[in-house]
Image: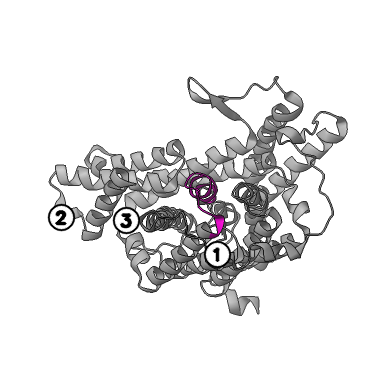
Amino acid sequence: MLEKIFKLQENKTTAKTEIMAGITTFVTMAYILAINPSILADAGMDPTAVLLATCIASIIGIVYMALVGNLPFALSAGMGLNAYMAYTIVQGYGYPWQVALFAVFIEGLIFIILSLTRVREAIMDCIPPSLKVAISVGIGLFIAFIGLQNAGLIEDNAQTFVSIISFKENFSTSGICALLAIIGSLITVLLYIKKIKGSILLGIICTWLLGILCEIAGIYIPDASNGFYSLFPSFQMTDFSKLELTFGQCFNLDFKNVGFVNFITVILAFLFVDIFDTIGTLIGLSSKAGMLDKNGKFPKAKHAMMAEAVATTAGAILGTSTMSTFVEASAGVVAGGRTGLTALTVAILFLLAMFFAPIFIAIPSFATAPALIFVGFLMFTSIKDIKMNEKDYLTAIPAYLCIISMPLFYSISEGIAIGIIFYVLIHLLCGRKKDLNVLMYILASLFILKYIFL
């Protein structure tokens, strides 16, 4: 049955490999089950309701991705857009969270229309090969940077913006967590080099177990007031009745203090960021999975984009922020995931998470950090496909700017915007108009207008 549905042999994979890849993907993205409720709680939403809504919307999108597209990618509430909803729209603009959810709902409907009309695919296909590779490399650096943050290896610095932490200061909390992340990274690397199946997942589990041993030995001391919790999972059930606090609330609207123009701007902001975050992520993932055709196009882009659009619309009704394909899905791709069985495994684990969320959430961020750091390296290796000779500078320089912009500006979409703008400008100024298509002109113009007006 699995062979018939997912075409495992055709994709040169096995059920065991796919399931292991799915588990790896889920574990690296399970942090969203803790973070999203926390962020949206600051908007006045019930955390348990948000967790349930996030799980259900994720399952809807991932099952579509698995069964319709036969793709190994997973999605959930997008980081960045959830913060935009809570801190900018609700706290900053003063909009009720119900209005914010309605904006997400409208955005989802627009996504469905764009996906059906192939507009998003056309945008994806028009991006030059050098920028597609750059996007993959940039995402690698971006998720490696996220991994360093999750590990607690970097901290704010007034002079240099970021710097390495002091291991001796607060060693029993942040110091030991950062040290365990380093050890976990070394374990992951050694397992991968020795070609041990599931090396990334094993690295996560080993790091978590080491943390538990440190807590037993008194080396790691939980400090809940500062965000350092016990590493032991708790065994309690989720209160499913909480979902009624957010379900359908996107239609319970109060536009009293919401201007029409401002509301349209909010929808456009959601739309703009999510389109290019998704395009960037899909290009990076499909490139790493070897799913681009000989022309550098992703044949199944429509299915992936529709999965996200449907999940976003459903998520708004259930009570969560915009759904996005996760860059962490690259961990599953690197672990060998090539079919929808990987994604279906993730969906099943999201279903289990609804019942035993405290157990999954107990996996600490420092334990998943080594996976992100290492996967970042594996995606970075694609840089060899960017031609760096002097005659190729017209394409290499925009690719370079795209790569460095993603981690430095903490945004996939900003990296794409800067890469496209400079690609068009450099080609125009060098008299190479023939290398540009109409859609690249349009995209560059839209990005420039975004920086001026938004």
Q: How far apart are labels 2 and 1 at the CA level?
A: 47 Å
Q: How far apart are labels 3 and 2 at the CA level?
A: 15 Å
Q: Amino acid at mark 1?
A: Cys
Q: How far apart are labels 3 and 1 at the CA level?
A: 35 Å
Q: Quadrant of the N terminus?
A: bottom right
Residue at (77%, 39%) from the top-left corner?
Answer: 229
Side of 420 relative to 197 (left or right): left
Q: Position of residue 262 (x, y in %)?
A: 39, 53
One can see residue 59 in this view: yes
Q: Earlier in the sequence, mark 3 or mark 1?
A: 3
Residue at (83%, 50%) from the top-left corner?
Answer: 234
Residue 6's place in the image compared with 257, above or below, is below
Q: Position of residue 382 (x, y in %)?
A: 44, 47
Q: Earlier in the sequence, mark 2 or mark 1?
A: 1
Residue 91's place in the image compared with 180, above or below, is below
Residue at (66%, 65%) from the top-left corner?
Answer: 345
Side of 158 relative to 210 (left or right): left
- Which is nearer the eye, 424 or 188? 424
Q: Earlier in the sequence, mark 3 or mark 2?
A: 3
Q: Position of residue 338 (x, y in %)?
A: 55, 63
Helix, strand or loop under label 3 = loop
Q: Quadrant of residue 333?
A: bottom right
Residue 303's place in the image compared with 427, above or below, is below
Q: Label 3: how many residues lie within 10 Å, few (<14), some (14-19) or many (20+)?
A: many
Q: Which residue is mark 2?
A: 434
Considering every residue shown, the one lying at the far front of the view is 256
Q: Which residue is mark 1?
A: 250
- Of marks 3 and 1, the one in the foreground: 1
Q: Position of residue 295 (x, y in %)?
A: 33, 62
Q: Quadrant of residue 400?
A: top left
Q: Which residue is mark 3?
A: 127
